């Protein structure tokens, strides 16, 4: 029986139905959207995205009416917030194109609902919704950071089918979007030029192409748009090895204030790059703007070189050729926190960050207006679906609004040896024993209005607030490559299987160790740049041979129009950036593992 894609009317109705079911708990979702229905949607979306290239190119003719392009950053399961934001912005269509920049799942409590909504919108308006991949859209991250457990809690014995379909969908998501040949959007950041294959004499095979030696740190050069067009999408778990090298860079790299380009030793995967590299990339590719995501307020709280994202965004690099900015779309992130008092006894406070959406308009599509949203209040009660005590720094990943540290979600099932992929439904409890997330209050500002519009605010200048990723911090360093496609666990103290990846450290999760203080730079530590860019993170490729990596020479994907027919689908502007603050969207959170 042929699957019929939902109409936009049906997608918007599903949005409201899932929202209404949230207060009734995890099990209520399957009464609104059955496992069979969700799997059918995920498979249809997989076919659609498999037909899209690694670099999606959006070009609009210069007519009197050109569509807006609205760019979301990380959303991490903050369905209530995203739903309110979409209500305020309007549905996708000929006048409004949405680009979602990855990290839809993990950490937040409603990732299944969020993914279902975005997939429904994509199927209803395939030419007006772009779903890019984030580093959390991988098998490993979803195993340890909540998504697989959330699926189990919501779909019980049928969860393995939902989870398997989700992973296949993640593996075919595009890595980047190019808007009007002016702005490029990708989750983490810039990527290296792939090493040229040597010809002729036999050579010792390197398990880590692009790392060290020729084509490695000493010869690192930013890649081009053509490199990105030719790249694979990374497979199930991009690990920085072989054909997944470029995908891993795109998903995991970070900008820094210092010049140069080198391996991202803090994360153990990807690159760090300065404004000079951004300028060279912009000039070489005739671009004006890079929009990336990947870091929220907890990550930036431990960095002093770049600005905070408390307004939902930060302009990180301003060069003669153009800019690079970070957009984060999860307000009041992280959802689950322990609020530690400052040394002087001042009560700890949540970040209370806003969520931002970058709005690009023609003809140039390179001078974004920023719309920002507060967290929806009151926030529905929710439980975390992952063992935040073992897999992340409990200073951050603990129940929202709690007064002390949680010992972790002891009722949470971990993947076992008998179920290494975490695909079997093992009866995960929906409410982990030590995790009852309190409703997050409105914070120091008192009550928040319901979607009230406030005057525009100026963008946060780079470097004004503490930011950051601390090298060697707690990490999502799982099997594969430092979570290069998503590892899991702390660098230290991780539970078995949660960070067993040869000591590689993911800075985002490390960033989650930031102490939440009352000031913007509370607990700031400057991330030292690596002295020796040639050093190779140990254990880059354990199990790499087991991970299916697509080859550039593989058969071309099916034609997009044919796929849509098969599934029944209907046919920085720097200081001048305008900012509109829109009231409650709900508490969304940045990604420590992002």
Image: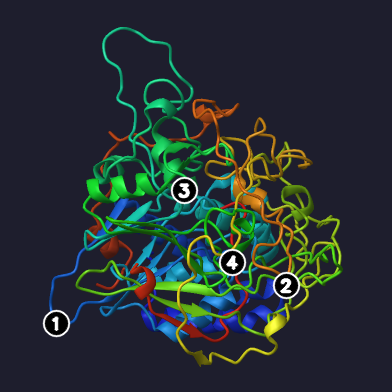
Could you tell me if residue 454 is visible in this image? yes
Assign a secondary structure to mark 4.
loop
Circles 4 and 2 in contact, beta carbons < 8 Å: no
Residue 7 in which image quadrant: bottom left
Task: Identify residue for label 4.
Answer: 77
Relative depth, front residue between 476 and 1: 476
Q: Residue at x 48, y 54 (%)?
A: 134
At which x and y percent is residue 489?
70, 44
Residue 423 makes an appearance in the image:
no
| 3 or 1: tag closer to the N-terminus | 1
The CA span between labels 4 and 2 is 11 Å
Q: Give the mark nearer the N terminus: 2 vs 3.
A: 3
Determine whether the residue tagged by mark 3 lies in a helix, strand or loop. helix
Residue placed most toward the observer, 526 or 123: 526
Q: Name the residue tied to disc 2.
A: 382
Q: Secondary structure at mark 1?
A: loop
Instruction: Give the residue at mark 3.
Output: 251
Residue pictured at 66% horizontal, 30% vertical: 502
Circles 3 and 1: CB atoms closer than 8 Å: no
Is 455 left or right of 420, judged from the image as shown? left
Determine the secondary structure under disc 2: loop
Q: Are marks 1 and 2 in contact (CB under 8 Å)?
A: no
Identify the residue under disc 1: 64
- Measured in 3D between alpha carbons, the distance from the residue under mark 1 to the one under mark 4, in whole angstroms, is 37 Å
Left or right for 276, reference 149: left
CA distance for labels 1 and 2: 46 Å
The vertical placement of 78 against 509, above or below, is below
Count of marks overlaid on the render? 4
């Amino acid at each position: 029986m042929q699957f019929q894609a939902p109409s936009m009317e049906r997608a918007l109705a599903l949005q409201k139905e899932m929202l209404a079911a949230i207060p009734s708990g995890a099990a209520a979702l399957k009464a609104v959207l059955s496992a069979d229905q969700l799997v059918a949607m995920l498979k249809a979306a997989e076919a659609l995205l498999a037909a899209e290239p690694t670099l999606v190119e959006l070009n609009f003719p210069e007519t009197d009416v050109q569509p807006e392009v609205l760019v979301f950053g990380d959303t991490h399961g903050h369905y209530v917030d995203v739903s309110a934001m979409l209500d305020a912005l309007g549905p996708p269509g000929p006048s409004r194109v949405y680009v979602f920049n990855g990290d839809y799942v993990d950490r937040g409590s409603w990732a299944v609902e969020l993914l279902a909504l975005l997939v429904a919108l994509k199927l209803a308006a395939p030419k007006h919704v772009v779903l890019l991949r984030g580093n959390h859209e991988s098998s490993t991250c979803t195993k340890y950071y909540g998504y697989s457990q959330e699926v189990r809690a919501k779909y019980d014995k049928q969860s393995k089918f939902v989870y398997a379909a989700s992973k296949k969908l993640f593996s075919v998501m595009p890595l980047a979007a190019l808007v009007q040949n002016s702005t490029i959007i990708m989750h983490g950041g810039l990527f290296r030029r792939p090493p040229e294959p040597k010809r002729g004499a036999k050579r010792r095979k390197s398990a880590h192409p692009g790392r060290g030696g020729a084509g490695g740190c000493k010869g690192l050069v930013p890649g081009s748009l053509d490199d990105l067009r030719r790249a694979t999408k990374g497979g199930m778990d991009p690990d920085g090895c072989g054909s997944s090298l470029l995908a891993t860079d795109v998903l995991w790299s970070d900008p820094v204030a210092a010049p140069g380009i080198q391996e991202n030793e803090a994360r153990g995967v990807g690159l760090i790059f300065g404004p000079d590299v951004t300028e060279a990339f912009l000039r070489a590719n005739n671009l004006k703007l890079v929009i990336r995501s990947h870091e929220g307020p907890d990550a930036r709280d431990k960095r002093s070189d770049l600005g905070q994202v408390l307004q939902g965004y930060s302009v990180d690099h301003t060069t003669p050729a153009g800019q690079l900015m970070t957009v984060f779309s999860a307000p009041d992130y992280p959802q689950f926190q322990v609020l530690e008092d400052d040394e002087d006894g001042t009560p700890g406070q949540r970040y209370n960050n806003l969520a931002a959406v970058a709005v690009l308009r023609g003809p140039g599509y390179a001078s974004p207006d920023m719309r920002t949203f507060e967290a929806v209040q009151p926030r529905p009660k929710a439980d975390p679906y992952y063992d935040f005590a073992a897999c992340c720094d409990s200073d951050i990943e603990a129940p929202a609004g709690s007064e002390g540290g949680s010992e972790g979600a002891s009722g949470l099932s971990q993947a076992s040896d008998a179920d290494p992929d975490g695909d079997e439904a093992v009866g995960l409890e929906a409410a982990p024993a030590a995790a009852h997330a309190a409703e997050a209050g409105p914070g120091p500002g008192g009550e928040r209005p319901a979607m009230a519009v406030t005057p525009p605010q100026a963008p946060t200048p780079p470097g004004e607030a503490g930011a950051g990723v601390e090298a060697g911090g707690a990490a999502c360093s799982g099997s594969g490559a430092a979570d290069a496609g998503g590892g899991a666990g702390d660098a230290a103290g991780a539970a078995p299987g949660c960070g067993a990846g040869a000591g590689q450290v993911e800075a985002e999760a490390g960033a989650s160790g930031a102490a939440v203080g009352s000031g913007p730079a509370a607990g700031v530590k400057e991330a030292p740049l690596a002295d020796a860019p040639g050093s190779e993170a140990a254990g880059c490729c354990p199990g790499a041979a087991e991970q299916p990596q697509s080859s550039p020479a593989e058969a071309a994907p099916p034609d997009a129009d044919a796929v849509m027919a098969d599934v029944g689908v209907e046919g920085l502007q720097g200081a001048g950036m305008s900012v509109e603050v829109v009231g409650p969207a709900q508490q969304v959170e940045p990604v420590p593992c992002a």
